[in-house]
Image (cartoon, rainbow, N blue to C red):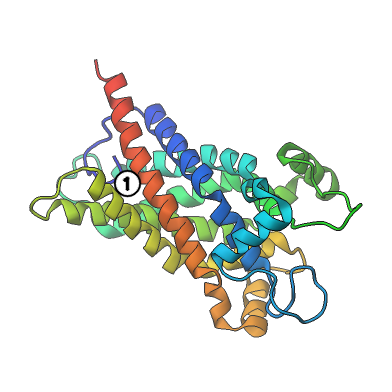
Amino acid sequence: MVGSNSKSDISFAGTFASSAFAACFAEICTIPLDTAKVRLQLQKSGIAGDGIGMSLPKYRGMLGTVGTIAKEEGLASLWKGIVPGLHRQCLYGGLRIGLYEPIKNLYVGENFVGDVPLTTKILAGLTTGGLAIAVANPTDLVKVRLQAEGKLAAGVPRRYSGALNAYSTIIKQEGVRALWTGIGPNVARNAIINAAELASYDQVKQTILKIPGFTDNVLTHLLSGLGAGFFAVCIGSPVDVVKSRMMGDPSYKSTIDCFVKTLKNDGPLAFYKGFIPNFGRLGSWNVIMFLTLEQAKKFVKSMESP
């Protein structure tokens, strides 16, 4: 279990399957908020979404953005990018969460007894987050490209007809290496957010369980999941903005270039642009994911135990 310091009580295959299932379920529930977040982050200050002159921003606030997208492009557009989103969660979610316990145990050593130090949990989270996204980066790129495409003028064809078409078009037009565009900020972002999520969930849960009256139940998982989401957004938001901008706009030369230009043109608060939608997204994502994960692991454990 994430949050227990004992050796894993279910197989790696069982942990991977539980993690991938929980991550996919959370993704389906919260991707409309993610689509809104991507649009808000890609919106340059002072310029309307359609790029005509210096007018009011097209998207305002999380629910406003969700409403605008649903009105202009139809409700289904809010689930744009769900196919690569699920590809991503199967790979990334399964690996980062599935590997967390084995890597944490590897760092503390076989004969370790007692509470695992927070620094070790953070290190394990950084390791599994970085490794997992290095494998899953193409799915992330395609997801952002599909989500970034807004309403098109009449007669203008869509850039990609779907997820698989996007993979093949990017390879044909930009080469295989293009699928790993933004790998720098993406590894940084996912290693940091993964460490913030998993280590804080682990730590908050461990702390709550020491309070008299609290047991390893749904309320504990709910509170720990909220804590994990909050820490992840506070720490990961600036990296997330840079990642979305780099993947959505190829004119930035590097991570540093994107960071400096964003700071210069839009000010430091731009890095916390979409903080509320980001927390709405990551907070709810973490609660759903961890609640589902804990239940899925219980189910797998009952299936695996003789």
Name the quarter where the N terminus is drawn: top left
- For image coordinates 74% across by 69% down, the residue present is 49
Q: Where is residue 227 in the image (x, y as percent from the top left)?
A: 32, 59
In the rendered image, is residue 133 in sight? yes
Question: Pointer 1: residues within 10 angstroms few (<14), some, or many (20+)?
Answer: many
Q: Position of residue 42 (x, y in %)?
A: 67, 66
Q: Position of residue 256 (x, y in %)?
A: 63, 73
Looking at the image, residue 156 sits to the left or right of residue 17; the answer is right
Q: How many labels does the image show?
A: 1
In the rendered image, is residue 122 in sight? no
Q: In terms of depth relative to the viewer, which is nearer, 131 or 186? A: 186
Which residue is disc 1 drawn over? 104
In the displayed orientation, state which residue is furthest to the front: 71
Q: Position of residue 96 (x, y in %)?
A: 45, 44
- Quadrant for residue 119, please give it: bottom left
Name the quarter where the C terminus is drawn: top left
Q: In terms of depth relative to the viewer, which is nearer, 112 or 46? A: 46
Q: In the picture shown, does residue 29 fall above or below 271?
A: above
Q: In terms of depth relative to the viewer, which is nearer, 254 or 88? A: 88
- For image coordinates 79% across by 45% down, the residue present is 160
- For image coordinates 87% across by 49% down, the residue present is 157
In the displayed orientation, state which residue is furthest to the left: 212
In the displayed orientation, state which residue is furthest to the right: 155
Looking at the image, residue 257 sits to the left or right of residue 268; the answer is right
Classify mark 1: helix, strand or loop.
Answer: helix
- For image coordinates 55% across by 65% down, the residue present is 62
Q: What's the amino acid at mark 1?
A: Lys
Q: In the picture shown, does residue 187 fall above or below 103?
A: below
